[in-house]
Image (cartoon, rainbow, N blue to C red):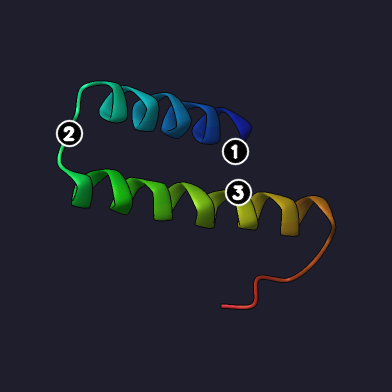
Amino acid sequence: MQFKIQDLQSELNNMIDNGDDYSKIYELSVKLDMLIVQYYNELLGRKNPN
């Protein structure tokens, strides 16, 4: 999962650098945030609240 997070971070940075559409940047940012929460919940042994 760490590599997926890193890939999305890189993709998000590229979108920001390229001035992509704000709604697409926001959508990817939300996906990235959710993945990070999931990663830390798994790391800490918590169940997914969703």
Of residues 31 and 42, which is closer to you in this image? 31
Q: Which residue is mark 2?
A: 20
Residue 36 marker: 3
- Above-or-below relation of 17 to 24: above
Residue 17 picture location, percent across and down? 29, 21
Amino acid type indicated by mark 2: Asp
Horizontal relation, residue 31 to residue 3: left or right: left
Of residues 30 and 39, which is closer to you in this image? 30
- Above-or-below relation of 36 to 11: below
Residue 14 picture location, percent across and down? 31, 22
Q: Secondary structure at mark 2?
A: loop
Quadrant housing the N terminus: top right
CA gap, disc 1 and disc 2: 25 Å
For marks 1 and 3, the one nearer the N-term is 1
CA gap, disc 3 and disc 2: 22 Å
Q: Which residue is mark 1?
A: 1
Horizontal relation, residue 43 to residue 9: left or right: right
For marks 1 and 2, the one nearer the N-term is 1
Residue 7 picture location, percent across and down? 45, 27
Question: Mark 1 touching mark 3, by CB under 8 A?
Answer: no
